[in-house]
Amino acid sequence: MTTGSTTTGSTTESTTGSSADTTADQPLLSVRDLTMHYPARRGAPVRAVDGVSFDLPAGRTLGLVGESGCGKSTTGRLVVRLLEPTAGTITFDGHDLAHLDRRGLRPFRGDLQMVFQDPHSSLNPRQSVARSIAEPLLVRGTTAADARRRAAELMELVGLRPEHLDRRPHQFSGGQAQRIGIARALATGPRVVVADEPVSALDVSVQAQIVNLLERLQRELGLAYLFIAHDLSVVKRVCDRVAVMYLGRIVETGDKAQVYGDPAHPYTRALLSAVPLPEPAAERARERVTLLGDPPNPAAPPTGCAFHPRCHKAADRCRVEAPRLAPTPLPPSSAVPDAGRLVACHFPEHAPVP
């Protein structure tokens, strides 16, 4: 199995690539100290993303989770360069994309694509489906006939009928519209796809179908996914590794079995304790971790650990010293193997989640 890594400062966990184009020292996508600060009318800037680092090997999936407003969607938009970062690097296949201008980005646009949360709002209501899917090809010089032929192939690939190419987005259901969004993202043959809450706007009955589609496409096309979501049950199913964000920073990352089975950060434990268990007896007996208050203002984050105002374990050290994301050894009794887990906490926990 291919593993990824998350790094901070001088701490780096090794990464093994699964593509001929990547090696252990060069994952397909490598993000380092990625930062996005929005200017505010008054006072300090809003720290939407504040020093995020992670690796994504070819053909694998990294889940990025956290509460609304934690910076996960902004991180995804930065990765595909829909936004320009304040600082940091975004290295794709050995090339730093972080500060390239529009012309410099042009050769890489097709390699990194995005699937958006709301399928209907991401499609132009005035354009036919054929035009929406073919447009990325047309701007790259593909003939209209070849672009339409490719659009028909992509419709079949995502489970839709090619004869519906001339319909408008409003003539499709939410699940069908998301399939169209996926087809459009695949038009240029990307190697990395950022899926930003791809099923959260869909009916529960349709969500599993879209997840199945994404998994099949990954197997068939060798795609790497940055999968952004707040539904931890979906992330557990589709992801190889998980990174937990809080107030613009990654506070814990590791193999999904490790993060779900033995979360070390109090915030991760709180998120997981809110995920319903299928067994009623286990649901009644499980530990509940309640967060105190609301998330802080990203324009005025707390001193020390940003999580300390909501943490039941907060001590004086937490109020003055920000913890660094670093390896946290597992206790000898742990049944979950160490797979490069990193935690930003002065007092990490190791009790298994029921």
Image (cartoon, rainbow, N blue to C red):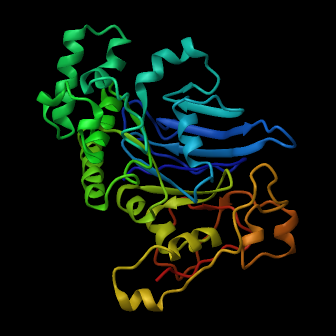
Vertical arrangement, residue 304 with respect to residue 162, above or below: below
Vertical arrangement, residue 241 with respect to residue 224, above or below: below
Residue positioned 40% across, 23% down in the render: 110
Q: Residue 192's spot in the image, x, y percent? A: 42, 35
Q: Residue 253's spot in the image, x, y percent? A: 56, 58
Residue positioned 49% across, 68% down in the render: 258
Q: Is residue 308 visible?
A: yes
Q: Is residue 226 left or right of residue 38?
A: left
Q: Residue 302's spot in the image, x, y percent? A: 82, 60
Vertical arrangement, residue 256 with respect to residue 179, above or below: below
Residue situated in front as seen by the camera: 343 or 156? 156
Count of numbered marks: 0
Q: Is residue 302 left or right of residue 342?
A: right
Residue situated in front as seen by the camera: 223 or 10? 223
Q: Is residue 318 left or right of residue 196?
A: right
Q: Residue 85's spot in the image, x, y percent? A: 66, 32
Residue positioned 46% across, 56% down in the render: 241
Q: Is residue 337 visible?
A: no
| Quarter of the rendering containing residue 268 | bottom right
Residue situated in front as seen by the camera: 92 or 47? 47
